[in-house]
Image: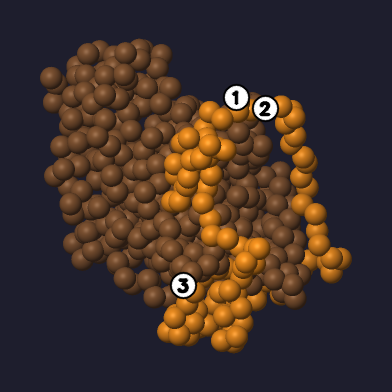
Amino acid sequence: MAQIDLKTLTIEKAHKALVAGDYTVRELCQVYLDEIKKRDGDIHAYLEVYDDVMTQADEAQKKVKAENMLAGIPIAIKDNMLVLGKKVTSASKILEGYVAPYEATAVKKMRDAGVVFLGRVNMDEFAMGGSTENSAFGVTKNPHDLSRVAGGSSGGSAAAVAGDMALASLGSDTGGSIRQPASFCGLVGLKPTYGSVSRHGLMAMGSSLDVIGPFAKTVADAEILFTAMKGKDRFDATSIDMTSKADSKPKTIGVPRHFLKGDGIDVDVMKAFEGAITRFKAAGYEIKDIELPNIEYSLAVYYVLMPAEVSTNLARFDGVKYGLHKDGATLLEDYLLSRSAGFGAEARRRIMLGAYVLSSGYYDAYYNKASAVRELLRQDFAKAFEQVDAIITPTTPSTAFKIGEKASDPVAMYLEDIFTVTANLVGIPAMSVPAGEKLVDGKTLPIGIQLSAAHGREDVLFALGKVLE
Amino acid sequence: MISREEVLKLAALSRIRLSDDEVLKMQSDMGAILAYVDTLKSAPTKESGPIAPVQRNILRDDAHAHEGGVFTDTLINLAPKHEKTADGQFVKVKKILGGSQ
């Protein structure tokens, strides 16, 4: 068997090697399983490594063909997507013992393409958080510095790939949950257009915001995964077929300078950001200042609409239909005991916040107001994309923070999402791409920049992302 | 700051039981979050009541998505309490209608 260098391995390279017969799917998967055994004790990306990896590998081997890019590619799955017959918990105690009775459409598409699922990876409980510190099963550490978070909520998905314990992974993004951990871990993370990837089998957090997307080491790899996952699905009424609009190459990139003032952004993050702009200029792109007049309200809008949807979606967990059951004297007490024992602090906070903004007397001031501002944001972006093909910002205001640093201050944690939530509110695609590094305490921490484009224009993100590689 | 009574009411609506310490913590956390989202008040929306987002209905055929009963065993078995009787399979819950009838 040829030597496999996991550090530099990509889907494209592994595919070529598998087709050429340099190694088998089994051998490739074994190398990853060995790496997981060696490193995951420290990193804690995986909640479960599946026991049927080799059986899957044998199935995948039959699909290895020149035209089938994903056959035999070992990936990790965020613990909020259903893999048929496997445990799935959304990193919550409330789904104790739950086994997926069906398969998520995105997962099914991966399986049909011959992808091998190594296991399910850690996350903030029900995808609520920016650090995986809200997992009921312990925090995931950043492979670049074990004293720091990998980001969240898809922290396990990011750490598994950054730690060479999976070649790629799937995550979900409701307000930045793919892009922020991708930025913290030095990966490419794509939040696709809302509806482009079916949500069937993805545990709902904010149904008008959620989308499944890939983590990968290169833009090309992210593109391969996205292309294989996308498409209309009869099980998700909000899913869409994206007719290719790739009739024009991107030429202009907008910068919302007015939103990047103030001292909240790390100096090195700004340096990496300006560096990326310089590279785009050098590559012949026109850089334009743009105004997004209501963008400063995005985070507030998000923290009204998202909890409202959370409190609705999480009402289904009642200790009766599935998952954890705590027995009380009455049915009401069963609910109270099961939900109180099953949900962690952040889940409770958002459920109750959602109940608050939806309650009569506050509904107009919060929910309706936020919905109206969301419409304004949509209009702002529609106008912006008449002038520019893409918008560039940092992905996050700073690099990966220390474990525990923000755990006790929910608002400080929420501010992590300042640059990412807007794409979810508006439904546009956005991607974090590595754009620099910062040296802190002898450790090199990655910095990401975020590119966003109009609905259905992932092709713009891929074209621009490749300029930075 | 949001009052203790309000937190208790929201907890009851949310079917979550909180300890006294948790109520206090929730008061301060929710207070801080609401103070932040209050910035929305200055957003320049027109005061014309609720705004309907531009959306359209997606309907599907009124037909069976799959053969009846194929998922019943799997789904019922996922319920923490379930029972199989001569009449069929059931998720078991506590009685909610009054005492002795």
Residue A28, x across and y down, in percent: 21, 27
> Which chain letter goes with mark 3?
A
What residue is pinned by disc 3? A410
Q: Residue at x 46, y 36 (%)?
A: B74
Give left or right: position of A405 versus A22. right
The Cα–Cα distance between marks 2 and 1, rounded to whole angstroms, is 7 Å
Disc 1, SS: loop
Q: Residues within 10 Å of mark 2 (few under 14, many from 20)?
A: few
Q: Circle 2 sits in a helix, a strand or a loop, which is it?
A: loop
Q: Quadrant of residue A83?
A: top left
Colour of the chain lettered B: orange
Contact? badges 1 and 3 (CB < 8 Å): no
Q: Amino acid at mark 1?
A: Glu
Provide the residue designation for mark 2.
B64
Query: Which mark is nearer the camera, 1 or 3?
Result: 1
Name the residue type under label 3: Pro
Which label number is shown at residue A233? Answer: none
Give the label, 3 or 2, closer to the camera: 2
**Quadrant of the image containing the N terminus of chain B:** bottom right
Residue sitting at the far right: B48
Image marks 2 and 1: residues in contact by CB distance under 8 Å: yes
Regarding mark 3 in the picture, which secondary structure is present there?
A: helix
